[in-house]
Image: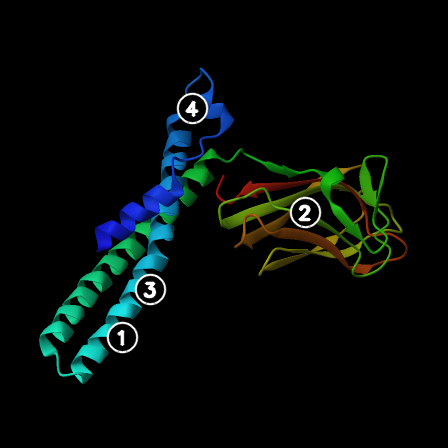
């Protein structure tokens, strides 16, 4: 029964959708191939879970019905099948967790030294605007720029910004992902643009939002934001 469910899942999934780059003459790197293999393996196991859970529920009901009807042999058979199915589900759950852990580890290794967020792709709010290649107009608390993260593996990332801040500008900002936040002060840059490491932000959803917002503003503008980089912690 379990094998039939797994075979049905494979047929439903079909062949893995290899990226166009994998079809070129140049062979993909071994780590890239391993990521594709893990992705297909995860799809297979995830697709198998729901049918197996449905079978488990049906067997539990069947066991009750047969026991109530006095057909104890059939009830015992349903119980034994349910136990085997429970063992298979537990095995699949462990394998899925191992595949996810392996995938995240490989993705982390393949990350560049710095992941840059394109200012032009930011969703702007509260008066923030692009001006001369910088994000400015952070005139009040809550003014913000939001990016969609590029499918990063979960983990810690150092948030590094390059900015310009005049004597009458500055204040404080917050960097937020799906669950965690990071606060930092924005100080005057007396020698032109400077780069500042704001600290380490824990990222839980690597394809979710990342928002930089003003918490307080000294006068009219928090800063001129020139670049945002994420560096995997420990590099």
How far apart marks 2 and 3 lie (CA) works out to 39 Å
Instruction: Point out which mark residue 61 bears.
Output: 1
Labels 3, 4: front one:
3
How far apart marks 1 and 2 lie (CA) works out to 48 Å
In the drawing, does residue 101 fall left or right of residue 131?
left
> Residue 113: x, y in percent?
54, 34
Rendered image quadrant of residue 75: bottom left
- The residue carrying mark 3 is 54
In the drawing, does residue 132 fall left or right of residue 11?
right
- Secondary structure at badge 4 equals loop
Name which residue lies at 49% across and 50% down: 155
Labels 1, 2: front one:
1
Name which residue lies at 38% across and 38% down: 14
Labels 2, 3: front one:
3
Q: If you read the primary sequence from the N terminus, does the residue marked by circle 3 or circle 4 appear first?
A: 4
Q: If you read the primary sequence from the N terminus, does the residue marked by circle 1 or circle 3 appear first?
A: 3
Name which residue lies at 37% across and 27% down: 30
> Residue 132: x, y in percent?
86, 35
Q: If you read the primary sequence from the N terminus, does the residue marked by circle 4 or circle 2 appear first?
A: 4
Labels 1, 4: front one:
1
Name which residue lies at 58% across and 42% down: 150
- Check contact, mark 4 vs mark 2: CB within 8 A: no
Q: Is residue 41 above or below residue 141?
A: above
- Secondary structure at badge 3 equals helix
> Residue 7: x, y in percent?
28, 46
- The residue carrying mark 4 is 28
- The residue carrying mark 2 is 147
- Secondary structure at badge 2 equals strand
Q: If you read the primary sequence from the N terminus, does the residue marked by circle 1 or circle 2 appear first?
A: 1
How far apart marks 3 and 4 lie (CA) works out to 39 Å
* Residue 115 visible somewhere in the drawing: yes
């Amino acid at each position: 029964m379990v094998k039939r469910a797994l075979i049905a899942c494979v047929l439903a999934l079909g062949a893995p959708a290899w990226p166009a780059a994998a079809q070129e003459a140049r062979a993909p790197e071994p780590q890239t191939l391993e990521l594709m293999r893990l992705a297909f393996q995860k799809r297979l196991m995830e697709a198998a879970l729901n049918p197996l859970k449905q079978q488990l529920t049906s067997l539990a009901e069947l066991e009750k019905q047969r026991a109530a009807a006095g057909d104890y042999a059939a009830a015992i058979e349903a119980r034994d099948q349910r136990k085997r199915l429970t063992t298979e589900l537990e095995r699949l759950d462990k394998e899925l967790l191992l595949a996810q852990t392996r995938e995240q580890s490989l993705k982390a290794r393949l990350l560049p030294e710095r992941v840059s967020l394109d200012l032009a792709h930011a969703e702007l709010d509260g008066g923030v605007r692009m001006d001369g290649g910088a994000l400015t107009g952070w005139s009040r608390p809550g003014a913000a720029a939001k990016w969609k993260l590029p499918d990063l593996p979960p983990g810690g990332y150092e948030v590094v910004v390059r900015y310009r801040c005049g004597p009458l500008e500055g204040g404080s900002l917050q960097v937020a992902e799906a669950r965690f936040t990071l606060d930092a002060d924005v100080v005057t840059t007396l020698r032109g643009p400077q780069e500042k490491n704001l600290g380490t932000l824990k990222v839980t959803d690597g394809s979710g939002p990342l928002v930089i917002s003003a918490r307080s503003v000294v006068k009219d503008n928090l800063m001129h934001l020139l670049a945002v980089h994420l560096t995997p912690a420990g590099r």
